[in-house]
Image: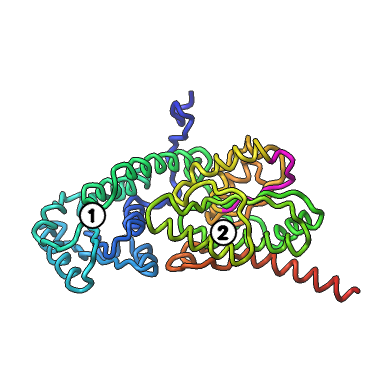
């Protein structure tokens, strides 16, 4: 067995291209737990980009702005003061306090600082730094801290932990953690991809559309589902079958609300979902569920469109048919191509566009497909 794999066949090769950190994973998990304010006990620039994005999603992110003096003499008193100030400014019903590389290296006692501040609301205390190889460690540590704070059921914690472990393995097997270095790519040209999709729809080919999206990213990937369904209906292709991980009864409250919002928008657009495969936090396993359905019921399909986390749908379930994949990860293009996905496109800057929204947002491929269809339709009318 290669030294680069362990018994489960998962790559252990060192990854040298940039990856999200465990601190960022902790931040987003606190968001999903509907924390009102998060205090990062670290320098003011720690996770600056993601903190700013999360503020677009309704969560306050502040720091203790640790500096050289705190690195030497400690910053516990600063943290206590910032906790009290956050309570004065924002009156949170749930507060999160997380560590950083700086505070964890010098051994700051977050719990004692919280006790000294005596905040009037529950506090999720996460001792975390960016030195973990798997960023999902930050999410798991945050969920464990939420159980300690009494805001998360232990059973839900165990479910979430198992999903996060599966998500980590998925990335190591077929995702951006599967290779030492992957160059970012914009993928295939969207106009060419849209033309290929339109041709298949016009020839009444049988298609499968699998929405298997991660959390709030579904707001944009769902737009491609709307575009495909609308164009197919206008053409008279009634053979599309749709799958979506939009179960409104599964997951953390924020994710259930996202699923309900998207389903309402799909209904308003006359989009029918044939199979609900699970929740928005279950993307590592809902792809397998979709694959099982495809194997058992849709062996006669001609093409598949996979949206969100395409590599979660097993290739053995897809067979040798034409596969279109849409991702928001520029480094995911090469792994998908190596899985024999024929057309791979990237929705650039998708994540910032899906923060703080409650309705489906336009996608590049969806808009391109609509434009190509309209162009061809208007051209046919002029020719008549």
Question: Where does residue 8 sit, x and y in percent of width and height?
Answer: 46, 29
Q: Is residue 62 above or below residue 211?
A: below
Task: Evaluate whether residue 180 shows in this view.
Answer: no
Foreground: 299 or 4? 299
Disc assigned to residue 223 = none
Foreground: 6 or 376? 376
Reply yes or no: does residue 2 show up in magenta: no
Q: Is residue 73 left or right of residue 273?
A: left
Q: Is residue 333 left or right of residue 95?
A: right
Of helix, strand and loop, which one carries label 2?
Answer: helix
Residue placed furthest toward the right: 384
The boundaries of the magenta stretch are 298-307
How would you rate the neighbour count of disc 1 (Cα within 10 Å): few for under 14, some for 14-19, many for 20 or more?
many
Of helix, strand and loop, which one carries label 1?
Answer: strand
Residue placed furthest toward the top: 1
Picture residue at 44% right of the left edge, 51% below the top: 249
Q: Is residue 103 above or below residue 2?
A: below
Picture residue at 63% right of the left edge, 37% below the top: 317
Question: Where does residue 124 sit, x and y in percent of width and height?
Answer: 23, 54
**Looking at the image, what colour scheme do you see?**
rainbow
Question: Where does residue 374 sit, x and y in percent of width and height?
Answer: 75, 70
Disc assigned to residue 124 = 1
Picture residue at 20% right of the left edge, 74% below the top: 89
Residue that carries the numbered disc 2 in the rendered image: 221
Reply yes or no: does residue 300 show up in magenta: yes
Residue 92 sits in quarter? bottom left
Q: Is residue 73 left or right of residue 282?
A: left
Foreground: 316 or 298? 298
Residue 166 sits in quarter? top left
Question: Where does residue 367 sit, x and y in percent of width and height?
Answer: 65, 67
């Amino acid at each position: 067995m290669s030294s680069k794999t362990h018994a489960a066949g998962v790559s252990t090769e060192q990854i040298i291209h940039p990856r999200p950190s465990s601190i960022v994973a902790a931040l987003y998990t606190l968001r999903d737990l509907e924390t009102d304010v998060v205090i990062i006990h670290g320098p003011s620039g720690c996770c600056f980009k993601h903190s700013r994005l999360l503020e677009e999603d309704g969560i306050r992110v502040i720091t203790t702005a640790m500096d050289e003096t705190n690195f030497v003499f400690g910053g516990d008193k600063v943290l206590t003061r910032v906790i009290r100030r956050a309570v004065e400014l924002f009156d949170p019903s749930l507060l999160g306090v997380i560590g950083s590389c700086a505070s964890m290296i010098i051994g700051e006692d977050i719990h004692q600082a919280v006790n000294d501040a005596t905040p009037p609301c529950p506090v999720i205390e996460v001792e975390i730094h960016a030195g973990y190889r798997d960023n999902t460690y930050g999410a798991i540590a945050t969920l464990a801290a939420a159980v300690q704070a009494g805001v998360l059921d232990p059973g839900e914690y165990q479910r979430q932990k198992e999903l996060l472990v599966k998500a980590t393995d998925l990335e190591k097997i077929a995702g951006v953690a599967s290779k030492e270095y992957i160059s970012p790519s914009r993928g295939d040209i969207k106009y060419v991809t849209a033309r290929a999709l339109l041709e298949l729809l016009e020839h009444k080919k049988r298609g499968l559309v699998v929405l298997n999206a991660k959390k709030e990213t579904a707001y944009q990937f769902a737009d491609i589902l709307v575009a495909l369904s609308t164009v197919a209906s206008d053409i008279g292709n009634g053979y599309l079958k749709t799958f979506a991980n939009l179960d409104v009864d599964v997951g953390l409250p924020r994710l259930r609300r996202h699923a309900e919002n998207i389903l309402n928008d799909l209904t308003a657009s006359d989009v029918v979902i044939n199979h609900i495969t699970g929740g928005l936090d279950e993307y590592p396993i809902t792809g397998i569920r979709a694959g099982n359905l495809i194997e058992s019921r849709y062996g006669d399909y001609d093409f598949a469109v996979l949206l969100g986390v395409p590599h979660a749908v097993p290739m053995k379930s897809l067979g040798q048919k034409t596969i279109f994949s849409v991702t928001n990860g520029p480094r995911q293009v090469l792994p998908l191509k190596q899985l024999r996905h024929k057309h791979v496109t990237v929705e650039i800057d998708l994540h910032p566009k899906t923060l703080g929204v409650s309705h489906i947002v336009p996608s590049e491929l969806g808009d391109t497909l609509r434009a190509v269809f309209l162009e061809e339709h208007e051209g046919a009318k002029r020719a008549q």
